[in-house]
Image (cartoon, grey):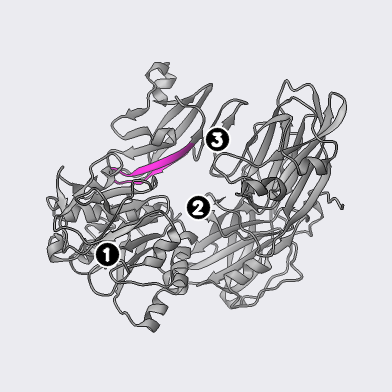
Amino acid sequence: MKKLLYILLLGVFAASCSKEIPVGEEDNRRITLLINIPSEKTVSTRSGDMSDECVVNSLDIFVMANGVLQYYTQATDISAPDANLKTTCTAWLRKSATQQQLIVVANRTNHDTYYPMKGTTIEALKANLCLSYPGAGIPMYGEALVADIAADDALEINMLRALSRIDVHLQAGVNNFVMNELYAYRAANKYRIIADNVSNIYTAPVATQPTLEPSTTFNVEVGPVTTAATTSTNQLYLPESAGVTAPAQQLSNATCIVVGGLYNGQQNYYRLDFEVGSYPFGQILRNFRYDFVISSVASHGWTTPEEAASNKASGLTVTVQPWNLSEKELLMTPDSYFKLSNRTVKIAASANSIRNIDVDTNIDDYRILWKTDYDAGLKHLATDSLQNANFKVVITNSGKILNFRALSANTAMGDKLDSIVVIAAQWVIPLYIHQEDMYKFLNKDIYCYSLAFNEYGSFTGRFKQKLENTANFGPSGTIKVGSLITENHTTNSGTTWNSYVAYSNLSKYDILWLGYDRFPTAAQAQTILQWLRDRPNRVLIINSDSNDDNTQIHNLLNNGLKWVYGGSTNNFNVIFSEATKKFTNGPFGDIAPGATILRRDNIFGRTDASGSPHIIQLTTHDNGMMVVGIDPTSRIIYLGDGDIFADGRSGMSSGANVEPNNASDVFAMNLFAWIVDIVLQNSN
């Protein structure tokens, strides 16, 4: 059986390519690129350095518009990474007054074999930027949206490595085992440089699911990699793997690691599996750093690495932790672990804005405390809920979420700052709160698009007037933004409808409302959800007014919601809770406790959402079933009644102003304040 040793060979890459792809000299603009290399965090003593992981030897820039390639070029004058892991380089791009998408690829090895032509689709580009594994180097990938390319612009690109890194080390005190070899079995034979499944691509990119070339097989064997006696650090890099869910196939099909070494003086081999928290068994994600920590070795393993790779792991105790850019702190011992999705919380400027941090831990009784109190020695005040004049912080969802709320608007020029500490077992972890000022997005326009059979369930009439009133959403409005621009289409013509839901058309918009009597096909539903998932600053509103509305969308979401239709003539009940406070007591006013939202007629949908933990229920009907709800994780609004914002009997006041005592006005505008917040905060 052929064994393949994967060793980093970035040093043999060609020097920075100086070839310039012509773009029309009269239209050129010289652009400085600031390339942010993903940072490294490790809990073990480093046996080598990370310089090869951070080097950019070549940089290709693919300029896209509406999903197709306009041209591409290569950067020159690429610097070595500085102390902050930032590389600078120069590129010449065509001047443009329209938004363009830059796809930036570092360290690809097939420069001389693939020169994409103008008109190449993003799908074709991804398919051709696929490399065999093993190979030399670690390609990286990043994106930027550029609204206006002008002379001497500086663009900042955040990169994501296309491979993962695997480290193995012995915990102090393991004296009966000496490492000497490392293998990988059933690794992917190829990988794509450009990822499909990335969150926060422009700010802090992190892979959420593996991106696999359809023809990928998992048949590559790597090793032996010679290790030190107690550690293997930055020696092994692997492509992504999807993981194996069927227990019967996990031993035979899952990618795994085998560590070899002397157990009580005899050579033995032990299997290590990628089995981390909520991630699928055997799943490997790009730019994760997996640190296997061997905390004890209790018995003999297998006599060959092949046997170890085909049998259940036994004989040693191992914990494994992933690393990625979103996990700013991941602390662990053999018995406990504590992971936070971020260390800095950015909250929007308006009052009652909320942000969550995800927590993954097996510590049941962690507590929080204002950092000023901790510094003053008041550790005994630590609790599960904090509140001062500016912020409220609560441990919720059985300890899985830290919820941060701004209690007042930040009208100052500059961020409003505060900090807390998390006290978990022996760890004290500081978290930093930044409430952004109200003037950050004064030049940002938000484009809203609705598709409905008629004017109900769309941006029309009184609702449109209120949204486009700059006293509500505008440079000097309640929500300080450039403007809200709404666009409606109510045709039911097949040909026209097809053009409306084409990706090239949807890509112009930040918010999409699928309103009354809309019937996208399964393929169109896939396009709509792809539009939503491609950018974190997009929000989808789905109407469920009848049993035919947007059925294919609901089928693809597969979220367990079963909609039923029709009901009594009673109005909708507003839910008043900590989770809904952003909507009941938001920037456009407060809804009086007990108030209801008027319904236009008794044609509407409702569903039992009690089994959907990500969905926040906002209004219910007689039997407590949800009529309106939001899923902040997926950025989806569920409207059981598409007429809820319609004129007349829906209860919205006439004119462009928000009436503070009108529950329908306040509810609708607070809901849209939340939607705009999502668009703005994820647009950077």
At x 66%, y 63%, the residue is 213
Q: Residue 560 location, x and y as percent?
A: 40, 53
Q: Is residue 183 above or below residue 212?
A: above
Q: What residue type is labelled 1?
A: Asp
Q: What stretch is highlighted in magenta?
A: 344-359
Q: Residue 625 location, x and y as percent?
A: 26, 50
At x 51%, y 55%, the residue is 202
Residue 284 within the magenta-colored segment of the rendering: no
Residue annotated with mark 2 = 200
CA separation in Å, label 2 and label 1: 32 Å
Please tell me the numbered disc located at residue 329: 3
CA separation in Å, label 1 and label 3: 44 Å
Residue annotated with mark 1 = 545
At x 74%, y 23%, the residue is 174
Sequence-wise, the earlier of marks 2 and 1 is: 2
Sort mark 3 into few (<14), some (14-19) or many (20+) by Cα contacts within 10 Å.
Answer: some
Q: In this view, does 599 lie to the left or right of 451?
A: left
Viewer can see residue 139 = yes
